[in-house]
Amino acid sequence: MITNDQGIVDEANGHASKLLNVATAYLTGKPLLLYLPQRDLYFRLFEQVKLDGTAHARVMVRPRDRKAIEVGVSITLLKQQMRWCWVFVHAAAREQERGMPAVTSIPLSSEPLAG
């Protein structure tokens, strides 16, 4: 997903659409914050990207009409475009890929994902 520097979605692919349970066409122009209930963490990530150009964390995502889920996110500043690239990965799927059991309940933090 690509947002502007204010967190408004400029582009979203089919994976983002499926994750957020919203048609791709309807994501464009919407604030990403609508789908991220952890506002404090969201703003801390924004600050980290402004300072370092990148940030990684586990966050809760609230899809439309569905229960919130935990995902990993990597955010990269696209300096030439003044836009941000957000890559979301289901946390349980990432752990299963590594041969680790899925964790159904873990404390959330702004700690980087191992990887």
Image (cartoon, grey):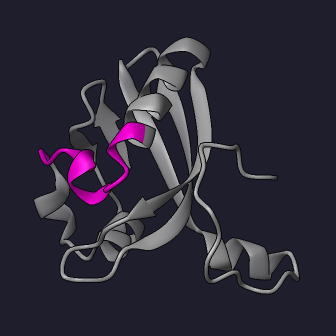
Q: Nearer the viewer, residue 83 or 54?
A: 54
Image: 78 above or below 115: above
Asked if the magenta segment contains residue 33, the reply would be yes
Residue 114 % position (x, y): 80, 52
Q: In the displayed structure, does residue 83 sit left or right of residue 59?
A: left
Give the residues drawn in magenta, as a range. Answer: 29-40
Percent from the top left, x then y, of residue 12?
31, 55
Q: Where residue 45 appears, x then y in whole percent?
A: 48, 33
| Front residue (pair 79, 73) | 73
Nearer the observer, 93 or 109? 109
Image spot of residue 99 (x, y percent): 88, 82
Within the image, what quadrant is residue 101 found in?
bottom right
Question: Above or below — where is 91 with respect to 65?
Answer: above
Is residue 8 shown in magenta? no
* Rendered position, 10 above or below 23: above
Is 94 situated left or right of 87 in this image? right
**Residue under the image location 46 percent in, 45 percent down:** 86
Instruction: Count every numbered label the image shows and give the total.
Output: 0
The part of the image, by quadrant, that contains residue 105 is bottom right
Extreme residue toward the right, this view: 99
Extreme residue toward the front, this view: 107
Residue placed at 72% from the left, 51% from the top?
Answer: 113
Q: Residue at x 38, y 64 (%)?
A: 61
Name the residue at 51% across, 69% down. Answer: 70
